[in-house]
Amino acid sequence: MPLLINKKIVANDNWQSIDVESLEQAQALPSGDIIVPLSFYLENRDDLLGRDGQLGIQVNGDDDLQALYAEQDNIALVAVEFPIFRDGRGFSIAKHLVRTGFNGEIRAIGDVARDRLALMQSSGFNAFLIPEDRFSEEDLNAFTEVSVNYQGTAADPRPIFRR
Amino acid sequence: MYQYNEVDQTLVDERVEQYRDQTRRYLAGDLPEDEFLVLRLMNGLYIQRFAPMLRVAIPYGLMSSEQLRKLAHIARTYDKGYGHFTTRTNLQFNWPKLEEVPDILAELAQVQMHAIQTSGNCIRNTTTDPYSGVYANELEDPRAYCEIIRQWSTLHPEFAYLPRKFKIAVTGSTEDRAASQVHDIGLHLVKNDAGEIGFEVLVGGGLGRTPVIGKVVRDFLPKEHLLSYLDAILRVYNLNGRRDNKYKARIKILVNALGVEEFSRLVEEEWEYSRDGELTLTSAEIERAKGFFTPFDYDVNAAADTSFDQKIAEDRAFKTWYERNTVDHRVEGYRIAIVSLKPHLKPAGDITDAQMDLVADLAEKYSFGEIRSTHDQNLVLADVKKADLYSVWQGLEASNLARPNIGTLADMIVCPGFDFCALANAKTLNIADQINERFDDLDHLYDLGDIQLNMSGCINACGHHHVADIGILGVDKKGEDWYQITLGGSSREDAVLGKVLGKSVAADDVANTLEKILDVFVEHRQEEELFRDTYKRIGMDPFKENVYALAH
């Protein structure tokens, strides 16, 4: 799956996303930089934090977001899942993360495609994992299609009347 | 009125090109159907029963003569020569071609217009009192705040994929002509004990299948906090509103499920982060917005005119129109003139390209070049000198836009119903005709006095049937159209939901039933009492008895 960071295609993704089933079947926690679901993180917090390698947490709008925000100093990445195209909760999760000073990677995963990239970036996402079949090189144009923003963005929170 | 600057113009121009590309990718098969559906809806494009329908935004119902002429041009060039005004004060075109929509949007952008967020699960067009700025008892003109909300809500990155659509209305006086209490957010300009002006904030009103009157979440919000507080409400809704069932996804369901106290607590908690932050309105920004809505350069000699009295004395038809279709203006010598889009036996809210051009011309000549659209599907020329009223009336009369029926039973709100809408269960236009045929005597209508009749072709309630003195809801019973009647609703400052009269009536029987309802009113009313007051006094039972007595 193509990964965009800072509006560029990243060749190698050093993060490995692992689902609960694989984690539970494994003899030991995997090494390297891993992304685990929030529920698994909360149950295995100390083991995960005692491990070598960076840690990321995966959430979506159904998770206990306060629990995520309480742990954000311990992690380097939050993967926010968009389960379906119409689910817009991820935008507000990114907004919360930026507001509370999280400065790691905020990665959009799930139903992520061209026509929402610019909105995601304005809301605070800085990495986008796009399904192979939805990706084209032209997607990079999405970030500059509409140059006007009235409300303020994650990068510059001033609304237009304060700029 | 508000004039786009370079930034505003860039936004609509870029949005047109973005949508043009989305349409191209869709037609080329590169964009999945379900995704294009969401994207086109955010640009006001529905697919209706027979054709696409494009809904053009008219921010807080205010447009210029130039803009209305452009709408006429679009109706003529890309559609079948007419448009339809909605309760959201927008204009719908019923027959555009999907592949021509980008061109229509480009035409709109030339006159500072667009179709952004007129549909979809996002913040829709903010509406207000059509008499804003010209009504005598106004606390402050709400349009400056509407414009501030328009900019903040346009292409809001965080709030483009809400659980469901989101509607905001703002009022500037104690009277409510914007149905603000049946909006997701209703904002009322109010003065506090210290004499400062701010907003009373209501949340969770709405119609549809679960009609609810909005609840006060804050008695007084200082005006500089307008956007930060809206931001907090929207974020609480975006994260907590239901997404598993679209019929339970509106904010009213969330407010009811949590209770207004808990909902308010969540909003206040969220607001703590943004209060006094970057979204706080500067006084310079408020003044800038107000600068676009300053009073016109009214003629100081307008009140000295005597020609008006002469015309009134000479021409009875003019006098009738004047009494029914014009309203007091705050400046002496001026009137607010209502253009009736309820001509006899024509669909409510419909207007032809020629009529649009005519209204645009009249506005340019006699009303400072501005036109307003109203929540009840009429147009308003808000600043007409009394001396010019006769000319305005003659122009309107010649174009079938001067039927003196404003406020009467014939001034109905009617959704397009089954004839156009893919959601509708029943027809509405034929029922409106049936009622108009039965109640075609204007003197009879005047005798009945002000009565609001609203009709919807399905429970989505686009015709606002819950909040009318008499509401009519079309239902489908085994393939036949039947009509359920409600009484005693109101969308005004005394907002209340109507109650169901009884079992629904057959299509042929609607006008008969209305007659029976009105007979009860005429029999029981005291002196000049209005229908709504008689209903409040005597209750539902006498109406029920008279309507259903003969059926037994």
Image (tube, rainbow, N blue to C red):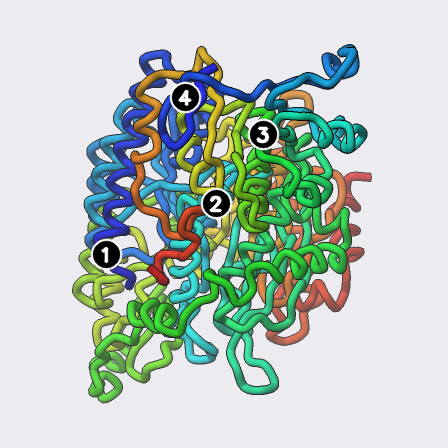
Is A72 displayed left or right of B418 in the figure? right
The vertical placement of B518 against B415, above or below, is below
CB atoms of marks 4 and 2 within 8 Å: no
Q: Residue under mark 4: which chain is it in?
A: A
Viewer-side residue, B247 vs B451: B247
Which residue does the numbered mark 2 point to in the structure image?
B437
Q: Please rate how many residues cluster around mark 2, counting C-alpha atoms within 10 Å: few if below 14, some from 14 to 19, many from 20.
A: some
Nearer mark to the viewer, of 4 and 2: 4
CB atoms of marks 1 and 2 within 8 Å: no
Nearer mark to the viewer, of 3 and 2: 3
What type is the residue that disc 3 sits on? Ala
Q: Position of residue B538 (x, y in %)?
A: 76, 65
The vertical placement of A5 against B547, above or below, is above
Q: Where is residue B391 in the image (x, y as percent from the top left)?
A: 20, 67
Mark identifier at residue A10: 4
Element class at badge 3: strand
Viewer-side residue, A76 vs A131: A76
What type is the residue that disc 1 sits on? Asn
Is residue B429 among what the camera can see?
no
What type is the residue that disc 2 sits on? Glu
Q: Where is residue B22 in the image (x, y as percent from the top left)?
A: 34, 25
Mark identifier at residue B5: 1
Which residue occupies 27% across, 37% down? B105
Element class at badge 2: helix
What type is the residue that disc 4 sits on? Val
Which residue does the numbered mark 3 point to in the structure image?
A79
Element class at badge 4: strand
Q: Quadrant of the C terminus of chain B?
A: top right
Viewer-side residue, B65 vs A26: A26
